[in-house]
Amino acid sequence: NAGVTQTPKFQVLKTGQSMTLQCAQDMNHEYMSWYRQDPGMGLRLIHYSVGAGITDQGEVPNGYNVSRSTTEDFPLRLLSAAPSQTSVYFCASSYRRTGGLGYTFGSGTRLTVV
Amino acid sequence: DAKTTQPTSMDCAEGRAANLPCNHSTISGNEYVYWYRQIHSQGPQYIIHGLKNNETNEMASLIITEDRKSSTLILPHATLRDTAVYYCIVPDQGGSEKLVFGKGTKLTVNP
């Protein structure tokens, strides 16, 4: 049971490049989410999913796409990287049950856009 | 926007109880209170949650007032490893699918 696995752990992109941040969980969780955390700030929700085939926008979705073709995977795509997207990205998953045990977070992907 | 307010920072002596308050005056009857913490640079960690009864697990205790407008997270014997930012969260619509993090409380445990 690996929990929530994020890859890569570190990435440097040039402005305008695209890339996909990978997130996988092996706990059969229905809910998955992506957050970003800028230096000295709290976490902001980018996109989330309540199950395979269902996604929705969070607080800061612009510049990012997601899809959820399987229960296990929830990749985050940066369409055209910008320096403002330099951040630490966290993926998280949870059971669907209301009042459940909360989200399990991955260890993060540290992205720098130059 | 976050539906909770917390103090920006708190200090606690090692070995003493740390009591972290949270106000959630607009909470609805079916909305849970969740607590998470984030130790420097790591992903947030779930601590505990509750609806209206007090809760305790191996990490902490959660005391919710009778009117449910506030709660207190208690770390009974704080250690240096408990230094972290603690987030009190009330998810929307009674469900847990969408967590909105506020700024949290930076707890510093001093030797």
Image (cartoon, coloured by chain):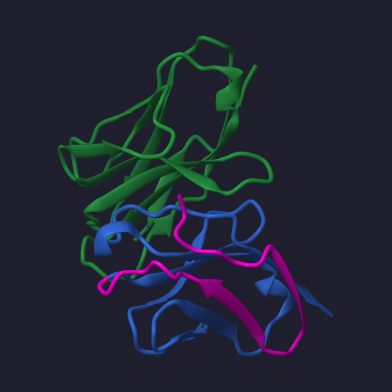
Q: Residue A42: percent from the left, percent from the top?
A: 58, 49
Q: Residue B32: percent from the left, percent from the top?
A: 34, 71
Closer to the camera, B108 or B65?
B65
Closer to the camera, A76 or B85?
B85
A38 sits to left or right of B28:
right
Residue found at x 65% / y 16%:
A114
Q: Main secondary structure of the magenta part?
A: loop
A102 sits to left or right of A39:
left
A95 sits to left or right of B43:
left
Q: Is residue B45 above or below residue A52?
A: below
Q: Residue B108: percent from the left, percent from the top?
A: 75, 70
Residue found at x 38% / y 57%:
A3
B64 sits to left or right of A11:
left
Q: Which quadrant holds the C terminus of chain B? A: bottom right
Queried whether the magenta region covers residue B24, the answer comes back as yes
Q: Is residue A66 above or below residue A5?
A: above
Looking at the image, which residue sits at the far top? Answer: A16
Q: Colour of chain A?
A: green
Closer to the camera, B52 or B96?
B52
Q: Is residue A79 above or below residue B34?
A: above
Question: Magenta segment range?
Answer: B1-30
Queried whether the magenta region covers residue A53, the answer comes back as no
Give the chain letter for blue: B
Residue found at x 26% / y 64%:
B94
Looking at the image, which residue sits at the far right? Answer: B111
Q: Is residue B83 above or below residue A59?
A: below
Q: Residue B110: percent from the left, percent from the top?
A: 82, 77
| Tally of numbered tags | 0
- Where on the picture, by quarter, is residue A45? top left
Residue found at x 34% / y 34%:
A75
